[in-house]
Image (cartoon, coloured by chain):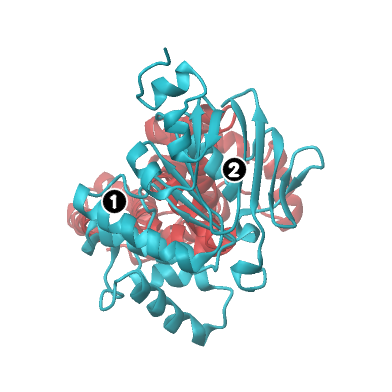
Amino acid sequence: MGDLAPSSAVGGLRVRLRQDGPIRLDAAFACAPGELHALVGPSGAGKTTVLKAIAGLYRPKGGEITCGPAVWFDAQAGTWMSPQDRRVGLVFQNYALFPHMSAQANVETSLQGRPRPEREPRALALLAQVGLEGKAHRRPADLSGGEQQRVAVARALARSPNVLLLDEPFAAVDRRTRRRLQADLNVLRADLNIPILLVTHDLDEAQALADQMSVLHQGEILQTGHPDAVMANPASDLVADILDLKPRA
Amino acid sequence: MDWSALILSLQLAAATTLVLLPIGVILGRVLAFHDFRGKRWVEALITLPLVLPPTVLGYYLLIALGVASPLGQAWQALTGETLVFSFSGLLIASVVFNLPFAIQPLQRAFEGVGPDLRQAAWVGGLSPLATFRKVELPLAWPGLLSAVVLTFTHTLGEFGVVLMVGGAIPGETRTIAISIYDRVQAFDTAAAGIMSAFLLISSFLAVAVVYGVGARAVRLRG
């Protein structure tokens, strides 16, 4: 288990992925600490594959991934760090909460590197931070969709992650809950100071939350920039089409 | 009631379950989580004892374990005894015969765990062994229980393979199912009736437990 130094000490995330198959990838971007970078694109564009490669759950054929001074993946040098050693926080699309464990036990699974007596108070503090006081003993099935998402966020933060990865985290909740959770994320990120990557197909969400946005299509990043700038100035007709904008004259 | 046959059957069932459980967990898990060339053939081979007449399986086991076979000869050189018509030979046959009863419920159970949960555990810092212990096994335990119960009760009722490989040596290879057959042949329907009722009730209870546990597991997962 790695050390548990404050995450703010860690530098930015740099990603470059290339492969022709089985899933085509041609993506390069960087995300500074404290920055929220959105990966947008239609379903099947390869967004989740990029996220899984960063988490260490998918090994592409070519490219590099570095986080500050640490090399997580370097295809040429044959470097590959396991997901356990990368210390990323990942919120899965369907949350992937352990159904047989309480909310607290779910969070504690990500605290195994800490001394045993510290785990419970830390898990309870994290659950309180995401607004789940008094619900620590409930199992995922006894929580609403929004509450499950909060447990998933608390579990992701429990590792004091170097990077926070969010895979369509608001897709499975209703509109009202989504707006509340998005507001909460904005508050949360002020305290985090780590790179945050948000995968979404919802452009409004990207525009509302992201500092940078990359438009992904069939594994390839077509354009990267501030969401407003990309929306105002799509680099090609294809980008305009993906962003549902009128084609350039 | 032929007590020595019942005790022998219970011993054989316990030994088969004990030997088969680790094999079932390892193979069931491999089949659930990995795709490899020839996987369908392996699955078909494991299912074969379900559809093959026990006499056919028994015949091939008799050949494979017999004194003329390399395995039979090696066993004889080691222990001075033959593998066929012995408890050890019966145990090997029983393990082969029960492969689908142990592996299939475990494979289905591990498949039910889903890749996301395992990945969430790894990203959360759990080693593959800790993931197995804390996530996979607690979620797959209904499958584990099914495997244990089905293997145990199926061994109790085994007839064809046991007769082919073990014969009916009292205290050594005459199991309760064979004893029932012997009693019927001897027109001792009372003894056959008691033993049959025992197998009927124990098998019914075992299957009911498996279904009950399955339903409870579904409720728990929500």
Chain that bears disc 2: A
Q: How crowded is mark 1: few (under 14 residues within 10 Å), some or many (20 or more)?
A: many
Task: Give the image location of residue B55, x and y in percent.
Answer: 43, 33
Identify which residue is drawn at 68% across, 37% down.
B69
Q: Mark 1 lies on which chain?
A: B
**Looking at this rendering, what residue extends furthest in the right direction?**
A77
Q: On the picture, is A105 further left or further right than B189? A: right
Disc 1 from disc 2: Cα separation: 61 Å
Residue B176 picture location, percent across and down: 34, 55
| Residue visible at 29% across and 51% down in the picture | B180
Give the structural element (helix, strand or loop) at label 1: helix
Drawn side of residue B17 relative to residue B69, left or right: left
The answer to whether B209 appears left or right of A40 in the picture is left
- In the image, residue B22 above or below residue A190: above
Above or below residue B36? Residue B33 is below
Residue B180, label in figure: 1
| Visual hue assigned to chain B | red
The answer, for residue B203, to whether it is visible in the render is no
| Amino acid type at mark 1 | Ile
Residue type marked 2:
Ala
Chain A tint as drawn: cyan
Residue at 54 percent of width and 44 percent of height: A52
Quarter of the view holding residue A245: top left
Which residue does the numbered mark 2 point to in the structure image? A53
**In this rendering, position of residue A60 left or right of residue B159:** right
Rendering coords of residue A67 (x, y %): 67, 54
Give whichever of A136, B14 is nearer the camera.
A136
